[in-house]
Image (spheres, rainbow, N blue to C red):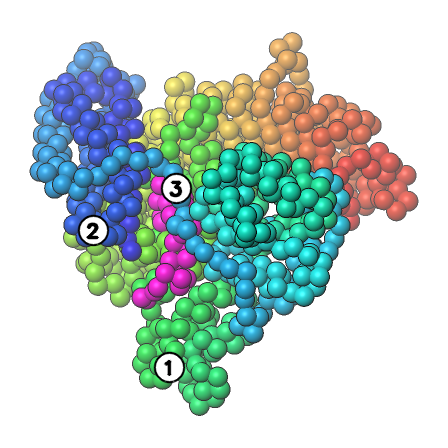
Amino acid sequence: MAETFLFSIAERLVDKIVGLTVDEVRLAFNVKTDLKKLEDTMISIKAVLLDAERQQHQNDKLRLCMWKLRDIFYDAEDVIDDFKCEALRKQDAINHPNINNLKVRVLGSFCLPLSFSLKMSHKIKDINGRLGELATEWNSFDLRQCSDNRHVFRRETISFVDSSDVIGRDKDKENIISMLMKPSEDRNVPVIPIVGIGGLGKTTLAQLVYNDDRVTSLFPLKIWICVSEEFDLSRLLNLIIQSVNKEVRCDDLTLEALQACLRSLLNDKKFLLVLDDVWNENQAKWVELRNLLRSIDGLRQSKIIVTTRSLKVASLMSSICPYELKGLPFEDCLTLFTKWAFNDGDERHYPNLIRIGEEIVKKCKGVPLAVRTLGSLLFQKTDESDWIYIRESEIWRLEQHENDILPVLKLSYNHLPSHLQRCLAFLSLYKKDEIYLSDKIIRLWMANGLLEHAKQNQEWEDVGKQYLNELLSRCLIQKEEDFRLKFTFKMHDLIHDLALDVSQRECKIVNSKTKTVDENVQHLLLCDEKLVEVPCVLEKLEKVQTVIFQDSSLRSKIFDKSLINLCVSNFKYLRALELRDSPLTALPNSIGTLKHLRELDLARSEDICELPRTFYKLYCLQSLNLGATSLKQLPDSVQRLIELRHLVITIEATHLKEIRAGCWTSLQYLELYNCFELECLPEGMQYLKSLRTLILTYCDSLVSLPRSLKLLTKLEHLVINGCTKINLEMEAEEEEDNDLQLSLKTLSLESLSVLTALPRLLLQGSSSTLQQLRIRGCPNLSILPAWLPNLTSLQKLEIVNCRNLSALPEGIDRLTNLRELRILGCPKLSKRYSENGGEDWHKIAHIQKVDIY
């Protein structure tokens, strides 16, 4: 069922209203009272929204009212964002005065555009009026204030399972039993976590193990507890005691009495405790139970099995690597499907249905509960049209019961904080089997305001990384490949179905067959090789904030121009526009009217050689990707974008224009890509005070780095790749150079054919922060500096294809934090430091992980 995301939207909107600066409010001097009224109303509504979200599924009138509120909230957010845009426009006018804004320059912040002030006043009064009209209906629902404690509705599981109903888990069962039979090595509570998404069969696997004769023989006492909802110590002790001895009455016992009772029952007994369906991520609650269990005599002989959907839960409950349950093979899934779709043996009479069934099973991607759900829907149905309907339908559109796959997966969604729910739903904008790129998704979340406010000493990008790590730990996404500064990930098809279900009125994939689109949809993905013109159905939309275009081999300049014209004319509050691989030779001047645009991606648009003169009007732009374009030079207009945080550029010039003081003060990420003619980095690099990542890729003519990089105290990641003429020799020249306090964490040097020295100035200035050093494909590097062991925080050192390197520097054993050393394609080093007879192996023997090839 589509979600309103109302609490998350309200939370963000209140933060924006409260966060309006004095200068921004003064831009519309007559709206202060109306803004205060809006703020008070929003706070009042937000206070009871959690109760509304919990009741909406049983009250259609309430749900309809919430959808009306959602539309008002979105309009209110757009109005509040107008203040930000106007403030940035005025700041730009002051920073770059000309004859047209002389009055703004002279009068400064006291010159208020009357038209803007009147327009804002009218819009905010309109928002307040609409909320007022809805107030009577809203108040009639008698909603109560409640806290945002995400909980899981209680599920009951039992220890029994009919093993004949379980298919394809024999190997997993043997693996878990093998782990149970291993003796415990220390006094820690021996916990075996089984982890995976909902419906994968974690509980079933635990039941199989629990009922195995060998386990019964090994553990005379077995206890099965379905934890499910609340990890409350008193409740759990009560359940364990009742499981051990049903005669003991303990409902009214104090916690102290419960502990004493449990010890008396379990002391010197060898037991297996299964804690099924654990959601608790509060370490303190687990520690309470763990410490109590530790006090039981003979605990080391006992074992605990935990099933959970969260890697975070697994890590806080156990020090051993969790058993991550995988999907069933196709053949096992087909056998299971047949078992649920037919009476025994009947499948032999319907070979045509089995062929369709094979396609249905593929949709389940190895998840047994999904197989069972779809098989059950077809039980005793032999009409081919019924089977074709299931095959052609999205799983999330099919009717399902409480214990079917989508409701079970929805428990994971319900347990997410409200801000993560929206971020997960946003991922449904892409097609199934999409390989997502972490930093791109974070930028799109940022552009659409889906991230919470960053805390002190934290950036928006850090918040986005936390969100992705949270989704990873809950098994809602799976990491594919790690690229150090970013990673790719996938989403299981069934989780994608879940995201589609909750985001129906937020996200829409549009192709040549699309006939209808909800008028309030926020995010669009256009993808279809047959899409040769902008679908007419989009012309009725006005609320769109994201437009991404991909996968069209028949794409033309006319299409892209039409799409931009549609954005300009209809999508006034567009936040993100992705037109990668565009055939356009230039952007229209009208692009400058998209004043709310925060993300613009034109990567690989090879025919674009200049930007329009109105480009500076994209005041809110946070991310700009001009990589692999044909820009002759980066115009001054780009430097005027003071909100810019992420910039990727390709230019054909030998020099970039000087960076002026006050420009790009928010820039976090700068990548120069395929700038083949670029001979040096621009003057004024020292003004990039916020820069954290600098990447130089295939800048063939670049010969050195400017010494001004030593002033970039926030720079954490430096990557130099394929710059064939660069030499990085940077020695201390001034007294102050010896006391630099830099923040570099990773340095990657790759395919640098003339490199003979490492950048001492940057590395020694980062001696207490550098964690990873990567040197690859540097054939002229023959010696590593003697000062390298001064990098005391170094954790990973990788040296690949540096054939002239013959030794690591003396004192390498002083790098006590070095956990990983990788040497590949360096014959002299490999021989000298080989574990099998290498003369200097003893110097690196302390390193935890050594790979030498």
Query: Of 215 and 579, which appears nearest the observer?
Result: 215
Label 1: which residue?
380
Q: SS at mark 3?
A: loop
User: What residue is pinned by disc 3?
Assistant: 150
Rounded to the nearest angstrom, the CA distance separating label 1 from label 2 is: 35 Å
**Residue type marked 1:** Gln
Please state the horizontal and vertical placement of residue 288, each as a whole percent of the image. Answer: 57, 35
- Does residue 853 appear to the left or right of 747 in the view shown? right
Count the marks: how many? 3
**The N terminus: image quadrant:** bottom left
Magenta run includes residue 834: no
- Residue picked out by circle 2: 59
Residue 150 image offset from top left, x and y in percent: 39, 42
- Element carrying mark 2: loop
Q: Main secondary structure of the magenta part?
A: helix
Give the magenta-colored segment's residue range: 398-426
Q: Nearer the viewer, residue 230 or 594?
A: 230
Q: Reading the chain from its start, which is encountered first: label 1 or label 2?
A: 2
Alpha-carbon span between mark 3 and mark 1: 40 Å
Residue shown at the point (52%, 76%) measured from the top left: 335
Q: Residues within 10 Å of mark 2 (few under 14, many from 20)?
A: few
Q: Amino acid at mark 2?
A: Asn
Mark before the other along the chain sequence, 3 or 1? 3
Question: Are dots 2 and 3 in contact, CB under 8 Å?
Answer: no
